[in-house]
Image (cartoon, rainbow, N blue to C red):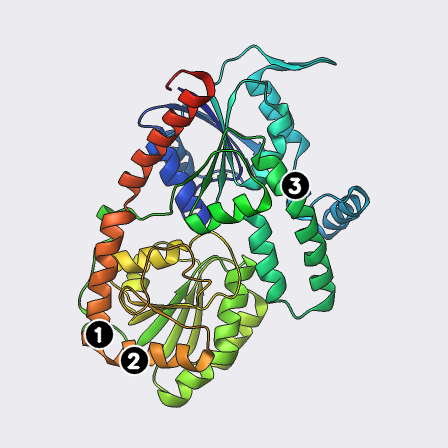
């Protein structure tokens, strides 16, 4: 089977949850199928990136794009207001990518139809922002959309956590636009993938009628070694995530302002490490003013940092999909304290695999409990590791993806591919 894989964000390095999911699913598909990748990049690709992608892709076509400026963002915003289209989606659409897709497909158009002289068995749209190129695909070609997040839900949850009036108005407009365009694009597909049953139900609620299957996020269990030495760990907690992703930045800021003061009052020696790319100015300024908080930015390998911490915190107030950071902490043996939305979609039980609270005081109490009660931390750690091994190993997930695509393609064309 030959698959054209279209993604706006280059799926390497593995420094975001989205990239971890994308790369591991591509790697699984490549064991059975031929992958041709079209992606964008603002920077020249280094040797490590090209080597990693070459292991899973027969062909790689990178479209170089310019970094967005205030002027280009303003222009995109004006266009979206005039056309009533989603700004989030329109700002990720590029003419150069359209040309690359047409070139790869050797697409020809006339007034009646789109035709292609090069055969692809399937087109894999990675994220909703890749699905905006769907009209370029010839009829009859099998279409797959990986909904890493239900964008309507993600934007709506961000609206609920927003205090800025201007941003609230913009998000309200986005919610209205996405309520129409997201189900429309999903219904153009032959198969939609979601990270959880929660997201699948959300799409059904929006009016998606195409086939939906749950392909959860996962962990390379063989590469994430469980560490049971809880009592030997540093007296610290860790947050790790993509810090230029609004739900992550807003979640850790909520923690620092509402929860950290309670922790510091009860245990002044407890420190907080914040790991992730592109931290905001306010996070850096907070850490500068407080010696117990350290913003580390991007690190080469987050595993050692997670394993030295007593607790991993996931204080998210918005978002969609499922959090890879939780599954990775589970695999490494670091117990997790999360909000409800942070743990959403993961088949984990409060009190058994992690601790969950949306109340700042209770959240702080849970963190302190796991920091000081090594016996309870170890019990939760063991349960969480077993859960990852049983349900969230990438090898099992990748095998399920291959099988689901084969079954859906059989229904689509009568041929199992």
Q: Quadrant of the C terminus?
A: top left
Side of 393 where 206 appears, left or right? right
Q: Sequence-wise, which precedes: disc 1 or disc 2?
A: 2
The residue closer to the viewer here, 403 or 225, is 403
Question: Would you say the residues marked 1 and 2 are in contact, meaning their CB atoms lie under 8 Å apart?
Answer: yes
Q: Residue at x 42, y 16 (%)?
A: 414
Tell me if mark 1 has few (under 14), some (14-19) or many (20+) residues whose alpha carbon lies within 10 angstroms of its own. some
**Can you tell which quarter of the image residue 110 is in?**
top right
Cα–Cα gap, marks 1 and 3: 46 Å
Q: Quadrant of the N terminus?
A: top left
Closer to us: 358 or 203: 203
Residue identifier under label 1? 376
Name the front one of labels 2 and 3: 3
Relative image position of residue 391 (x, y in whole percent): 28, 48
Q: Secondary structure at mark 2?
A: helix
Query: Which percent across, then down, holds residue 406?
Result: 37, 25
The image's mark for residue 369 is: 2
Q: Is residue 365 above or below residue 138?
A: below
Q: Residue furthest bottom?
A: 265
Residue annotated with mark 3: 181
In the rendered image, the vertical position of residue 277 relative to residue 65, given as above or below: below
Q: Secondary structure at mark 3?
A: helix
Under circle 1, the secondary element is helix
């Amino acid at each position: 089977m030959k698959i054209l894989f279209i993604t706006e964000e280059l799926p390497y390095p593995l420094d975001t949850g989205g990239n971890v999911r994308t790369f591991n699913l591509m790697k699984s598909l490549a064991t059975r199928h031929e992958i041709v990748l079209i992606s964008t990049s603002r920077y020249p690709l280094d040797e490590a990136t090209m080597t990693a992608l070459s292991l899973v892709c027969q062909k790689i076509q990178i479209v170089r794009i310019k970094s967005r400026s205030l002027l280009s963002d303003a222009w995109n915003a004006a266009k979206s207001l005039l056309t009533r289209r989603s700004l989030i989606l329109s700002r990720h659409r590029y003419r150069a990518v359209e040309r690359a897709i047409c070139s790869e497909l050797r697409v020809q158009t006339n007034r009646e139809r789109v035709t292609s002289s090069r055969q692809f068995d399937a087109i894999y749209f990675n994220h909703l922002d890749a699905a905006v190129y769907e009209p370029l695909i010839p009829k009859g070609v099998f279409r797959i959309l990986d909904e890493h997040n239900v964008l309507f839900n993600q934007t709506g949850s961000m609206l609920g956590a927003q205090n800025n009036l201007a941003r609230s108005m913009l998000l309200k407009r986005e919610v209205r636009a996405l309520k129409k365009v997201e189900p429309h694009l999903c219904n153009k597909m032959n198969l939609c993938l979601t990270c959880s049953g929660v997201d699948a139900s959300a799409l059904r609620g929006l009016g998606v009628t195409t086939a939906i299957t749950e392909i959860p996020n996962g962990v390379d269990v063989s590469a994430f070694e469980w560490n049971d030495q809880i009592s030997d760990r540093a007296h610290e907690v860790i947050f790790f995530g993509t810090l230029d992703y609004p739900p992550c930045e807003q979640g850790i800021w909520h923690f620092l302002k509402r929860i950290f003061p309670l922790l510091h009052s009860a245990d002044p020696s407890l420190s907080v490490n914040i790991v992730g790319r592109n931290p905001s100015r306010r996070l850096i300024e907070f850490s500068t003013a407080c010696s117990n908080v350290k913003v580390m930015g991007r690190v080469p390998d987050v595993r050692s940092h997670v394993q030295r911490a007593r607790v991993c915190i996931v204080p998210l107030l918005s978002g969609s999909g499922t959090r890879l950071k939780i599954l990775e902490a589970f695999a490494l043996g670091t117990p997790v304290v999360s909000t409800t939305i942070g743990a959403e979609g993961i088949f984990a039980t409060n009190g058994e695999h992690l601790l969950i609270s949306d109340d700042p005081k209770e959240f702080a109490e849970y963190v302190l409990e796991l920091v000081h009660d090594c016996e309870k931390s170890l019990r939760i750690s063991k349960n969480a590791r077993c859960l990852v091994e049983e349900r969230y190993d990438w090898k099992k997930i990748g095998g399920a993806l291959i099988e689901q695509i084969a079954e859906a393609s059989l229904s689509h064309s009568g041929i199992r591919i």
